[in-house]
Image (tube, grey):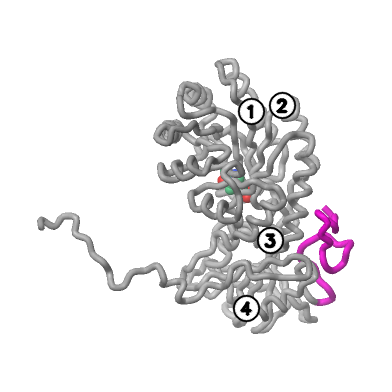
């Protein structure tokens, strides 16, 4: 990284600085835009994203893979905001989706069907029909049953569905939390390694399916290159066996997403090393490479801004109560995830150790436990780092809390990409009075 000029866009603030969140004096800024100014204009809690940071991540990864024909299909579930999708589309990304809703969003952001890879462990018939009608580039098929249903859906529309088999390559990855591992034996994801060839042969015999690729996704927050290479080699062996059995259309290798970023002091994926090894493995095959990065592109491009509501001292513990809770940022309670948290405006206070907790009626509602942080008073703003991926995307209305606003910063400007929800938004889709049906009534 360390590039300050990307795609002709000079990042605001210091020209020598990498994109993203930095202090200018005591003030935390996003590419030179003071976060306090955004909080004043938009309120809190608010997610703030750096366009320059996303461009930097995309360009770094794409350039590193230049030795092989490839496309980065952004994993929409990491952050599905339309402005983020549009930004990535403009950079040349495709998308990786896991639902019909994500297909709808992607098309709304300006992507075409050919830009779309449809992944996911459970696709409904309706979602298959929707994706076939859109003409998606690829279906990553996760089971024999799904393949049979997809063949039938394609027959109905008189088309052939482009298919890659998502194989579970049975590689163990050392992700920080078991919920983010997906590529080991016995998990719900993918076709088991020892079944993949049989399912491939089944696909070859189907009239409305063309088997054009193989796919894997081994987990999330993976910082090692080796599991990708092990998995890719396993897919390439399978590819040879399928070619020997008459598969002539295999031309795509999708090695999934999962590239790690640094939240605290853990190692991020070494992109140069990763890309060099992947290029060396894939380039000789002549296959087109697909990657599905989510977190890598947007994770550290986002910060959650929250205001301190209260301070409390109880049971020998300090508590900092914020206006953002687990409904806004679920990762700390769901994955025990670490997020750096700092005052937006640095004072001269002493360092204390405190639990930073939200207003929700759950003991699991925290942003950080036993965290060393500068003493802050009610009214102060805190910045929660690393909130760009699986942040707003996992937000809910639990406790009837409107979801936070989302803001995009580009250069020295900011724009509201999604306004804060209103109370009216939260009740809009509920029926009162109820409109009853009686399916068992005799007449
Ligand atoms: C979640 C997911 C990704 C993205 O994972 P990241 O860790 O955010 O890169 C990619 N592909 C599939 C199939 C996924 O489910």
Secondary structure of residue under mark 2: loop
Q: Calculate the distance from the C-alpha at mark 2 to the C-alpha at mark 4.
A: 52 Å
Q: Which contiguous range is marked in magenta?
A: 1-26
Q: Calculate the distance from the C-alpha at mark 3 to the C-alpha at mark 4.
A: 20 Å
- Of callouts 2 and 4, which one flags the residue occurring earlier in the amino acid sequence? 4
- Of callouts 3 and 2, which one flags the residue occurring earlier in the amino acid sequence? 2
- Of callouts 1 and 4, which one flags the residue occurring earlier in the amino acid sequence? 4
322 and 61: which is toward the camera: 61
Labels 2 and 1 touching (C-beta < 8 A): yes
* Residue at 41%, 45% in the rendered image: 126
Q: Position of residue 351 (x, y in %)?
A: 75, 75
The correct choice, above or below, for 124 with respect to 349 in the image is above
Residue, disc 3: 386
Q: Residues within 10 Å of mark 2 (few under 14, many from 20)?
A: few
Residue 13 in magenta stretch: yes
Q: Nearer the viewer, mark 2 or mark 4?
A: 2
Q: Is the residue marked 1 within 8 Å of ligand 1, measured from its CB?
A: no
Q: Position of residue 135 (x, y in %)?
A: 53, 40
- Of callouts 2 and 1, which one flags the residue occurring earlier in the amino acid sequence? 1
Residue, disc 2: 286
Q: Quadrant of residue 118?
A: top right
Q: Position of residue 189 (x, y in %)?
A: 51, 39
Residue, disc 1: 251
């Amino acid at each position: 990284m360390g590039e300050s000029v990307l795609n002709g866009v000079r990042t605001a603030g210091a020209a020598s600085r990498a994109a993203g969140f930095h202090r200018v004096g005591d003030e935390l800024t996003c590419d030179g835009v003071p976060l306090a100014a955004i909080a004043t204009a938009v309120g809190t809690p608010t997610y703030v994203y750096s366009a320059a940071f996303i461009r930097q991540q995309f360009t770094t990864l794409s350039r590193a893979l230049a030795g092989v024909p490839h496309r980065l299909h952004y994993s929409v579930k990491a952050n599905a905001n339309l402005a983020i999708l549009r930004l990535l589309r403009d950079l040349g990304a495709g998308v990786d989706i896991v639902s019909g809703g994500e297909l709808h969003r992607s098309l709304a952001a300006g992507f075409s069907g050919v830009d779309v890879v449809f992944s996911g462990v459970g696709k409904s018939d309706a979602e298959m029909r929707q994706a076939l009608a859109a003409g998606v580039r690829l279906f990553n098929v996760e089971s024999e049953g799904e393949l049979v249903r997809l063949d039938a859906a394609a027959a109905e529309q008189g088309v052939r569905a482009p298919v890659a088999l998502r194989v579970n390559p049975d590689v163990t990855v050392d992700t920080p939390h078991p919920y983010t591992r997906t590529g080991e034996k016995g998990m719900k994801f993918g076709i088991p390694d020892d079944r993949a060839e049989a399912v491939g042969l089944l696909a070859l015999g189907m009239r409305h399916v063309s088997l054009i690729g193989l796919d894997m996704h081994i987990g999330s927050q993976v910082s090692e290159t080796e599991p990708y290479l092990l998995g890719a080699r396993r897919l390439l062996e399978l590819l040879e066996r399928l070619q020997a059995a008459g598969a002539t259309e295999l031309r795509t290798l999708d090695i999934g997403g999962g590239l790690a970023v640094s939240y605290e002091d853990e190692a991020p994926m070494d992109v140069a090393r990763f890309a060099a090894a992947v290029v060396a493995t894939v380039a000789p095959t002549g296959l087109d490479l697909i990657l599905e990065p989510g977190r890598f592109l947007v994770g550290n491009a986002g910060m959650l801004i929250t205001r301190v509501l209260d301070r409390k001292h109880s049971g020998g513990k300090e508590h900092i109560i914020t206006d953002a809770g687990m409904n806004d940022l679920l990762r700390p309670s769901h994955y025990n995830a670490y997020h750096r948290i700092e005052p937006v405006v640095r004072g001269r206070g002493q360092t204390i150790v405190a639990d930073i907790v939200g207003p929700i009626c759950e003991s699991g509602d925290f942003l950080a436990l036993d965290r060393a942080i500068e003493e802050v008073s009610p009214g102060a703003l805190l910045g929660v780092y690393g909130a760009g991926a699986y942040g707003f995307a996992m937000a809910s209305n639990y406790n009837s809390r409107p979801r936070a606003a989302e803001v995009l910063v580009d250069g020295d400007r900011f724009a509201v990409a999604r306004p804060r929800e209103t109370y009216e938004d939260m009740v809009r889709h509920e029926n009162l009075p109820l409109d009853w049906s009686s399916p068992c009534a005799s007449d």
